[in-house]
């Protein structure tokens, strides 16, 4: 981790328990989470996936915390939104997202992720977004029953850049398509068709981060109609799926 990141990391998360012996290095292995590995969705700038974001235990406690809010006591209730002051579990989740980005940066320096992208270090989340306070102040929890999904959309412009989606329970494929009017993609000197659907598998406990092009010029959708949720040639078994989307409202001055 870069020195300034280390300092910021200490400010936000404090020193770990066994780094008090005047060795000022934060002991990253003592962090609440294992060092996360991030996957860059190469076709889409600004789209990152952390598959091992939450351990199975953390997933269970998060599901309990969400269900304990009492938002989904009736079957017809499938979405809850909160603005401003978020429940403690959501604030903790936001902190974990920041932590995963910081630790992920650390990992990318020693892997070829760092040398990809024509020599420029790929950025999980621009630092002005990573260090804004609060990182997120809006929360949506969606509960999807089998067959239910969300149609293709770009999140509303009233939200800032830098959106996180945590997936729980059933896996699903989220498809990304470029918004119309975007120019053709040129890759290796070849013009690729404008309408391209990029599938991304969202497994339980995974975290998606969208910023820049991924947030503004790509639509995302989850179509759980029969025959659409295919991954590696197999149709996914559908069960209930819960997602937690965290965003920040734009300031209105
Ligand atoms: O449920 C999801 O994974 C995505 C939710 C979403 O895109 C939204 O609420 O804007
Ligand atoms: Fe969305």
Image (cartoon, grey):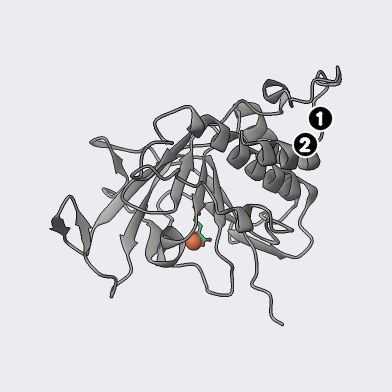
Quadrant (top left, top right, bottom left, bottom right) of the C terminus: bottom right
Left or right of 200 in this view: 124: right
The residue positioned 63% from the left and 44% from the top of the image is 97
Give the Cα separation between the discs numbered 1 and 2.
6 Å
Between residues 137 and 212, which one lies in front from this camera angle? 212
Left or right of 214 in this view: 1: right
**Mark on residue 15?**
1
Residue 234 x/y as whole percent = 27, 35
Residues at marks 1 and 2 touching, judged by CB atoms closer than 8 Å: yes
Residue 76 x/y as whole percent = 58, 61
To which quarter of the image does residue 25 belong? top right
The residue positioned 38% from the left and 63% from the top of the image is 219
Of mark 1 and mark 2, the one earlier in the sequence is 2
Label 1 secondary element:
loop
Residue 67 visible to the viewer: no
Between residues 199 and 71, which one lies in front from this camera angle? 199
Between residues 165 and 101, which one lies in front from this camera angle? 101
Question: Counting other residues with Cα less than 10 Å from the Cα at mark 2, is it few (<14), some (14-19), or many (20 or more)?
Answer: some
Q: Residue furthest bottom?
A: 253
User: Which residue in the protein does label 2 denote?
Assistant: 10
The residue positioned 72% from the left and 49% from the top of the image is 90
Residue 197 x/y as whole percent = 27, 55
Quadrant (top left, top right, bottom left, bottom right) of the N terminus: top right
To which quarter of the image does residue 230 belong? top left
Label 2 secondary element:
helix
């Amino acid at each position: 981790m870069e020195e300034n990141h280390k300092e910021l990391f200490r400010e936000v998360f404090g020193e770990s328990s066994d780094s008090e012996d005047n060795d000022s290095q934060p002991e990253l292995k003592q962090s609440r989470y294992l060092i996360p590995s991030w996957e860059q969705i190469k076709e889409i700038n600004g789209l990152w996936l952390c598959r091992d974001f939450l351990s199975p235990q953390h997933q269970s406690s998060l599901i309990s915390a969400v269900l304990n809010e009492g938002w989904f006591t009736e079957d017809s209730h499938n979405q809850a939104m909160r603005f401003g002051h978020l429940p403690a579990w959501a604030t903790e989740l936001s902190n974990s997202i920041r932590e995963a980005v910081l630790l992920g940066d650390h990992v990318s320096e020693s892997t070829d992720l760092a040398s990809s992208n024509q020599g420029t270090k790929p950025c999980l989340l621009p630092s002005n977004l990573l260090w804004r306070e609060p990182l997120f102040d809006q929360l949506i929890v969606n509960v999807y029953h089998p067959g239910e999904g969300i149609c293709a959309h770009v999140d509303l412009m009233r939200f800032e850049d830098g959106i996180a989606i945590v997936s729980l329970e059933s896996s699903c494929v989220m498809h990304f398509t470029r918004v119309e009017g975007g120019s053709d993609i040129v890759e290796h000197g070849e013009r690729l068709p404008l309408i391209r659907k990029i599938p991304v598998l969202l497994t339980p406990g995974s975290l998606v981060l969208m910023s820049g092009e991924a947030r503004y010029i790509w639509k995302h959708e989850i179509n759980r109609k029969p025959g659409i949720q295919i991954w590696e040639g197999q149709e996914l078994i559908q069960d209930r799926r819960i997602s937690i989307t965290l965003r920040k409202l734009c300031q209105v001055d």
